Image (spheres, rainbow, N blue to C red):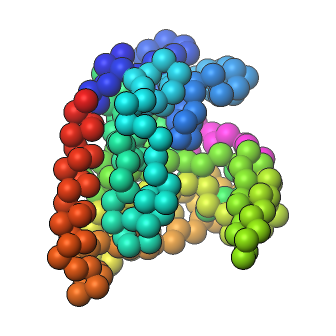
Amino acid sequence: MQANGITIAYESFSPADRETVLLIMGTGGQLTMWPVELCEELVKRGYRVIIYDNRDVGLSTRFGAAGEPDFAAVVSAAGAGKPAPLAYTLYDMAKDAAGLLDSLGIEKAHIVKADKDTEAGVLPDEKFLSALGAFYEEAVKAGVILAGEGLQPSSKGARVRYSGSKRTVIDGPFAETKELIAGYAIIQFASKAEAIEWTKRFVQVDAPGRLGAESECEIRRIFEAEDFGAEFRLELREQEARLLADAEKRKGK
């Protein structure tokens, strides 16, 4: 399937006339990583399920010509609040997901702080998915959501800790459930007050589908070039402009 200017390999379960659940694997993930049992269970609950290979893996478009990422440069850019020098970003991958839905003619699809249910991999019910889907549809039409994804249980993840010259890898699950994140969204508003009002509406929708009917969201700003003031010198701004221009060229290849 052609979407967002690339080829995206996908599979679809159940008839096309059902409400859609788009399962998004993490960066570098293939559709084969999704348990068939999970897809079948969602189909039993009356949904159409779509899974796909992320860009650069599986049968989707590869970006081998871009070479391996320079992780030192990526970390340096992140610390300076600048765009990472990468051939593509999570924002591009978010547009891949949206583009796939568009190419399939799907107008909307059903994705959130972690609780015991999310850590156990418990699936939300149809009522919750429908309410959440309606909220996201409104937010997308209003132009306030730029990207967003749900995260799988921490039992499938790991933490890398650095202290001095020692690096320690800690496999999940992690005990402090209330301190974990179950999903994120990148939103765009003119003011903090506006962001708070939309978030209030989100938790009102989200809480009924959560353990104990509780939901909590943290709102944080993303750094922009202007936030660094005089420290972000002219040569650094020019470097950023060059990197952005180069990234646009790479996306066109």
Q: Where residue 131 sits: x, y (%)?
A: 47, 46
Quarter of the image where one finds residue 105: top left
Q: Is residue 160 magenta?
A: no
Q: Is residue 126 magenta?
A: yes
**Vertical order, 209 against 101 (above or below):** below
Decide if residue 53 is in sight here.
yes
Q: Where residue 42 sits: x, y (%)?
A: 63, 26
Task: Specify the quadrant that holds the C terminus.
Answer: top left
- Residue most extreme to the bottom: 230
Is residue 155 shown left or right of residue 228? right
**Vertical order, 133 against 15 (above or below):** below
Is residue 203 shown left or right of residue 247? right
Residue in the foreground of this view, choosing between 55 and 149:
55
Decide if residue 204 is in sight here.
no
Q: Where residue 186 sits: x, y (%)?
A: 39, 58
Residue in the foreground of this view, choosing between 112 and 162:
162
Q: Where residue 162 sits: x, y (%)?
A: 70, 69
Is residue 106 shown left or right of residue 34? left
Q: Residue at x 39, y 65 (%)?
A: 77
